[in-house]
Amino acid sequence: MEHQGKTVTLKTSFMLFIAQFCLAIILFSLYNHANRSSSSNEFSYTSIHQEPVKDTRIILVWTWPFGNIFPLNKCPPYTDISGCFYTANRTLYSSADAIVLHHRDVCYSRKQLPQIQRPPNQYWVWFNLESPSHTPNLHFMDNLINLTMSYRADSDIFSPYGWLEPNQREENFTIPPKTKLVAWAISNWNPNSKRVRYYQELKKFLPVDIYGRQHLALPGNNHIKTLSNYKFYFAFENSIHEDYITEKLWKNAFKSGCVPVVLGPPRENYERFIPKDSFLHVDDFSTPEELAKYILKLDNDEKAYQQYFTWRSRLHPFADTNWQTHYCRVCKALKEAPAHKTISKLGEWYK
């Protein structure tokens, strides 16, 4: 009986040991998982073993712009990224040759910027496609930025909303069938804005179909086809600034085969990028009523209307830009970057 008692005691002890060992493993796993989860939500700057090929320029995407994730290291052929490696892994911060800061994702708190000392000769690239009117806290960037990337033609990295490319050969452009007169798509209806005030006067003399919030629904997957039914499109910008010519012209008007009626920077600014006979500018007319009369005149003169498409035999618009398109430009600019410079007051230039 005594021997049997010792055997039971040994078995019990062994089972307790196994149970404690298993419990220890479970607790250790939970601890590691918690640490990984916590660290993934914090900025980390430690090096990792898996690094890009030697002599490759590392470009760190500091934040996904407005949370939009896109493929890295897969770029269109016109943006040569040979010799560069794009990453969103902040553990590579210390070895990155450049980091790209999307302004609207870092402008509300300095804690959203890197918090440790910058490595020597690392370039900070400031990226922004919003107009100065919608770009807060530019002073956050004073004495930090080395290269600018925006729609401004005088940026270090010019990244427009669209552009024109030459046709391989002269070709006839077929104007889409037109059944309607004027369209305008607007998401931010501000009664005090210049564009809405201009429309309020214009609508007295001209019928306009308005798409967007609280107006007609514009299918996101079919809006080019919808707008192509119109002869004219109002490419009215939300604010007036140099070179601020957005997808309203490039995509909504040109890609849809409409004649754009623009409200934005002066006509001379538009003519730096597009032919003078490809659009109407509100500044060409003394009043909204005069603009309305001219549009109605073109509506009844097919030959005169078609003259606004003659440039299409030589050129075609590229308007399919996306976040990937913009970021892919950094590599070439980084390889050609001038001696290290720092912009002391970004807001004095970007206005």
Image (cartoon, rainbow, N blue to C red):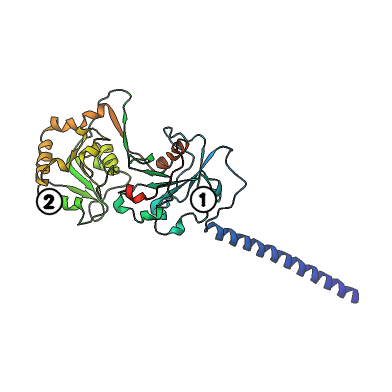
Residue on which the image places disc 2: 201
Residue on which the image places disc 1: 118
The residue at 34%/56% (across/down) is 136
Image coordinates of residue 233 in percent, x first then y, are 21, 42
Identify the element where label 1 is drawn. loop
The residue at 28%/42% (across/down) is 243
- Type of amino acid at the residue the image marks with label 2: Glu
Seen from the viewer's position, the closer of residues 272 and 224 is 272
- Give the quadrant of residue 179: top left
Identify the element where label 2 is drawn. helix
Left-right relation of 23 to 5: left
Q: Earlier in the sequence, mark 1 or mark 2?
A: 1
Q: Is residue 86 above or below residue 168?
A: below
CA neighbours of label 1 inside 10 A, class few (<14), some (14 to 19), many (20+): some
The residue at 31%/26% (across/down) is 167
- Type of amino acid at the residue the image marks with label 1: Arg
Image coordinates of residue 45 in percent, x first then y, are 56, 53
Numbered label tally: 2
Q: Are marks 1 and 2 in contact (CB under 8 Å)?
A: no
Spatial CA span between label 1 and label 2: 53 Å
- Give the quadrant of residue 283: top left
Left-right relation of 337 to 238: right
Left-right relation of 20 to 336: right
- Give the quadrant of residue 302: top left
- Could one spot residue 173 in this view of the protein? no
CA neighbours of label 2 inside 10 A, class few (<14), some (14 to 19), many (20+): few
Residue most extreme to the bottom: 1
Q: Is residue 66 above or below residue 157?
A: below
- Could one spot residue 6 in this view of the protein? yes
Seen from the viewer's position, the closer of residues 6 and 240 is 240
The residue at 55%/46% (across/down) is 95
Seen from the viewer's position, the closer of residues 71 and 229 is 71
